[in-house]
Image (cartoon, grey):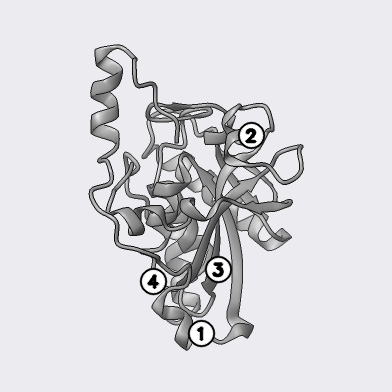
C-alpha cells in the first residue's frame, strides 16, 4: 500500500478516513483458518480476487464462513517473480490479489463474489481510496469456465441493481500465474491489529442466495 505522505490536507483527510494504522503486533498468524480442520480436501476449491490493497481484501475474505485459507500475492502481469517493489512501480501489470481456498460445501463461489463486491468500490478505475495504479484495479480472476459464467452473471446482476451509482469497471479475466507476496504481507492486519477499507455498499445477490439454497444452507 502506497501513501503520499506529503500530499495536500484534503488527501490526508481522506487517508485518515480510509485507513486506521496498525496498533500492535500479535505475532505470527497462520494462513489457515479453523474451518480447515473439518474440511474434506475433495471439497476444496480456489478463487482469486483483486480489489485494491490486498491487506484489507484478505482480511475481508478471512471473515467469510467456509473460507479455509488465504494468501496474498501478485497476478495478471507480464513479468516473472515480481516483488512488492516491482509491482509498486505500476510497470509490471500485476494486481495485488488474494488467493482464497474455500470449502465448497460451506460457501459457494457466488457467495464469495458477494463478499468481493462488498469489500471495495468496483466503480473506480485503477483506484481504491488514496491508492492509485493498475495494481489496485478491481478484477475477478476465474479458474475455470464455471467461475467465469458465475462471475459474469454476478456482475450483470449487481450492475442492474444500481446499488453502485456509477458503472462497474471490474475486469473478469482468466487466472494466470500467482506469485505469493513477501511474508510480512501475509495476514497483515491480523498480525498488526490494523483495519482497512470497506466497500460503500453491502451486496446480497439473488445468485448467491440461490447458490446457498442449492448447497443446503
Q: Badges 4 and 2: C-beta atoms under 8 Å apart?
A: no
Label 4, secondary structure: give it. Answer: loop
Quadrant of the rendering where the C terminus is positioned: bottom left
Task: Kindly report the distance in space between the C-alpha atoms of the residues bearing marks 3 and 1.
Answer: 11 Å
Task: Kindly report the distance in space between the C-alpha atoms of the residues bearing marks 4 and 2.
Answer: 34 Å
- For image coordinates 66% across by 52% down, the residue present is 179
Which of label 2 and label 3 is nearer to you?
A: 2
Q: Badges 1 and 4: C-beta atoms under 8 Å apart?
A: no
Label 3, secondary structure: give it. Answer: strand
Q: Identify the mark nearer the N-term, 3 or 4.
A: 4
Residue position marked by numbered label 1 in the rendering: 39
Relative placement, left or right, of 123 versus 197 is right
Residue position marked by numbered label 2 in the rendering: 86
Q: Identify the mark nearer the N-term, 3 or 1.
A: 1
Residue position marked by numbered label 3 in the rendering: 101
Q: Residues within 10 Å of mark 4 (few under 14, many from 20)?
A: some
Q: Residues within 10 Å of mark 3 (few under 14, many from 20)?
A: many
Task: Kindly report the distance in space between the C-alpha atoms of the residues bearing marks 2 and 1.
Answer: 36 Å
User: As rendered, which of 167 and 142 lies closer to the eye?
Assistant: 142
Q: Badges 3 and 4: C-beta atoms under 8 Å apart?
A: no
- For image coordinates 56% across by 31% down, the residue present is 88
Quadrant of the rendering where the N terminus is positioned: top left
Task: Kindly report the distance in space between the C-alpha atoms of the residues bearing marks 3 and 4.
Answer: 12 Å
Q: Badges 2 and 1: C-beta atoms under 8 Å apart?
A: no
- For image coordinates 44% across by 75% down, the residue present is 213
User: As rendered, which of 75 and 172 lies closer to the eye?
Assistant: 75
Residue position marked by numbered label 4 in the rendering: 65
Q: Position of residue 187 (x, y in %)?
A: 42, 58
Picture layout, residue 122 above or below residue 177: above
Amino acid at each position: 500500500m502506497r501513501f503520499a505522505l506529503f500530499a495536500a490536507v484534503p488527501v490526508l483527510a481522506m487517508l485518515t478516513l480510509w485507513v486506521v494504522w496498525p496498533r500492535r503486533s500479535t505475532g505470527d498468524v497462520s494462513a489457515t483458518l479453523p474451518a480447515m480442520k473439518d474440511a474434506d480436501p475433495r471439497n476444496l476449491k480456489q478463487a482469486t480476487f483483486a480489489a485494491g490493497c490486498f491487506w484489507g481484501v484478505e482480511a475481508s475474505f478471512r471473515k467469510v464462513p467456509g473460507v479455509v485459507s488465504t494468501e496474498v500475492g501478485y497476478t495478471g502481469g507480464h513479468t516473472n517473480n515480481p516483488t512488492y517493489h516491482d509491482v509498486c512501480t505500476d510497470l509490471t501489470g500485476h494486481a495485488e490479489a488474494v488467493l482464497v481456498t474455500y470449502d465448497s460445501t460451506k460457501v459457494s463461489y457466488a457467495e464469495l463474489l458477494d463478499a468481493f463486491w462488498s469489500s471495495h468500490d468496483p466503480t473506480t478505475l485503477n483506484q481504491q481510496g488514496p491508492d492509485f495504479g493498475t495494481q489496485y484495479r478491481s478484477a475477478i480472476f476465474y479458474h475455470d469456465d464455471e467461475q467465469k459464467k458465475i462471475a459474469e452473471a454476478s456482475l450483470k446482476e449487481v450492475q442492474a441493481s444500481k446499488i453502485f451509482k456509477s458503472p462497474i469497471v471490474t475486469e473478469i479475466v482468466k487466472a494466470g500465474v500467482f506469485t505469493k507476496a513477501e511474508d510480512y504481507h501475509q495476514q497483515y492486519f491480523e498480525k498488526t491489529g490494523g483495519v482497512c477499507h470497506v466497500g460503500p455498499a453491502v451486496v446480497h445477490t439473488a445468485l448467491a442466495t440461490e447458490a446457498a439454497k442449492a448447497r443446503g444452507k
